[in-house]
Amino acid sequence: MRILITGGPRTGKTVLAVKLSIQSGLQVFHTDDLIDVGWSEASANAAEWMEQPGPWVIEGVSIPRALRKWLAAHPEGKPADKIIYLSVPRVELSSGQAAMAKGVATVWREVVPELVRRGVEIVFDPDPDQMPVAAAAASR
């Protein structure tokens, strides 16, 4: 199973990815590890991670931009089996984080129609207490 987890800042992406890793042994790639590079390079690196055979989890705010790049480079195929989109912040956001969340949502809306056309399973705002178990079960 190849799983992408994305959404705005502070929505629980990393927490969910770590839970999935613990429960199912999936390798996790964090786009936060690319914080020292710009948005363009970070999303390009994340798109390259999608080229690796699964199973894996890739999480972060730069995933929608990475998806846009991956889809442009691959006229067919799926970048992942499942994408989990988290939109509800767990804490109050700073103005910068709120602006980032809007940008993430804008790019996300651009790529969703193509992801649906290609048959990628998309899960919006799952129950955070139930999702790790369900996703881990699906990855077996």
Image: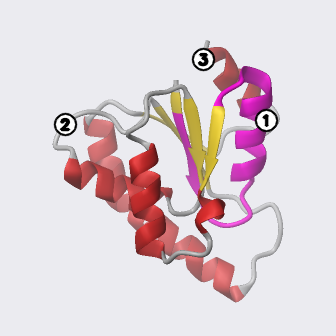
Residue bearing the label numbered 2: 76
Looking at marks 3 and 1 on the same chain, the residue that comes earlier in the sequence is marked by 1
In this view, the residue farthest toward the top is: 140
* Foreground pick, 37 / 110: 37
The answer to which of 54 and 14 lies nearer the viewer is 54
Which amino acid is tagged 2?
Glu
Q: What kind of colouring is applied to the model shown?
A: secondary structure
Secondary structure of the residue carrying numbered label 1 = helix
Q: Which residue is mark 1?
A: 19
Q: Which residues are magenta?
A: 3-26
Q: Secondary structure at mark 2?
A: loop
| Camera-nearest residue between 1 and 83 | 1
Q: Residue at x 60, y 17 (%)?
A: 138
Real-space Cα distance between discs 3 and 2? 24 Å
Residue that extends furthest to the bottom in the rendered view of this protein: 95
For residue 138, which numbered disc appears in the image?
3
Decide: is 82 above or below 16.
above
Q: CA distance from mark 3 to mark 1?
A: 14 Å
Quadrant into which the C terminus falls: top right
Is residue 7 a member of the stretch shown in magenta?
yes
Which mark sits nearer the N-terminus, 1 or 2?
1
Is residue 118 rendered magenta in the image? no
* Circle 1 residues within 10 Å: few <14, some 14–19, many ≥20: some
- Bin the neighbour count of mark 2 within 10 Å (Cα to Cα): few under 14, some 14-19, many 20 and up: few
Element class at badge 3:
helix
